[in-house]
Amino acid sequence: MANEALSPASRNRLLSALSAMFKRAVRLGLLTRNPTHGIQRARERVIALPLVTLEDQARLLAALPGSRQALFLCALDTGARLGELLRIAWGDVDLDAGSILLRRTKTGRPRIVRLAARLVRV
C-alpha cells in the first residue's frame, strides 16, 4: 500500500508502533539505533467533537435501564474509562469529599477524580 493511500493519522499510528518496536530492539541490544528516530509525524486534521448537551444527556440516561444509569452518569461526569469505572470499590468513593480514587488507570498511576453534585446525589 502506498504511503499516500493512508491518512495522516494512520501513518502516525504505524510510525508510533514501529518506533516502539525499534526502541525495544535497541534496549535488547538487537539494534544500535532506532531507524525511525527523526522521522516527522504527519500533520493531522483536528476535528471538533460535538458537545453532548444536558438535554441530550437526560435523554440518554432515560433510555437506559435503571441499573445502568449510574454507571453511564459516572462516565459522563468523570471522563473515566469503562475499565477504570468497573474497578472502583466502595472504599475508593468519598462522598463527603466528592471524589473517587481510580487506582488502576491507563497511565498506571492512581488519580483522584472530582464528582459533580448530580453524581454524588445518585
Image (cartoon, helix red, strand yellow):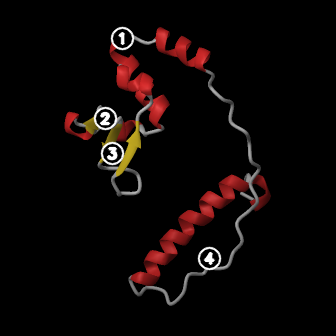
10 Å crowding of disc 3: few (<14), some (14-19), many (20+): many
Q: Nearer the viewer, residue 61 or 95?
A: 95
Q: Which of the two discs, 3 and 1, sits closer to the camera? A: 3
Is the residue under label 3 in contact with that under label 2 (CB below 8 Å)? no
Marks 1 and 4, how far apart in space?
50 Å
Find disc 4 in the rendering and name its residue: 36
Marks 3 and 1, how far apart in space?
24 Å
Q: What amino acid does circle 4 point to?
A: Thr
Find disc 2 in the rendering and name its residue: 86
Q: What amino acid does circle 1 point to?
A: Gly
Dot 1 or dot 2, earlier in sequence = 1
- As helix, strand or loop, the secondary structure at mark 1 comes to helix
Displayed quadrant of residue 39? bottom right
Q: Which of the two discs, 4 and 3, sits closer to the camera? A: 3
- As helix, strand or loop, the secondary structure at mark 4 comes to loop
Dot 3 or dot 1, earlier in sequence = 1
- Residue at (73% x, 55% y) in the render: 8
Identify the residue at the far front of this view.
Answer: 96
- Please tell me the numbered disc located at residue 66: 1
Q: Position of residue 55 (x, y in %)?
A: 60, 14
- As helix, strand or loop, the secondary structure at mark 2 comes to helix
Q: What amino acid does circle 2 point to?
A: Leu
Find disc 3 in the rendering and name its residue: 102
Q: What amino acid does circle 3 point to?
A: Leu
Q: Which of the two discs, 1 and 4, sits closer to the camera? A: 1
- As helix, strand or loop, the secondary structure at mark 3 comes to strand
Displayed quadrant of residue 96? top left
Marks 4 and 3, how far apart in space?
35 Å
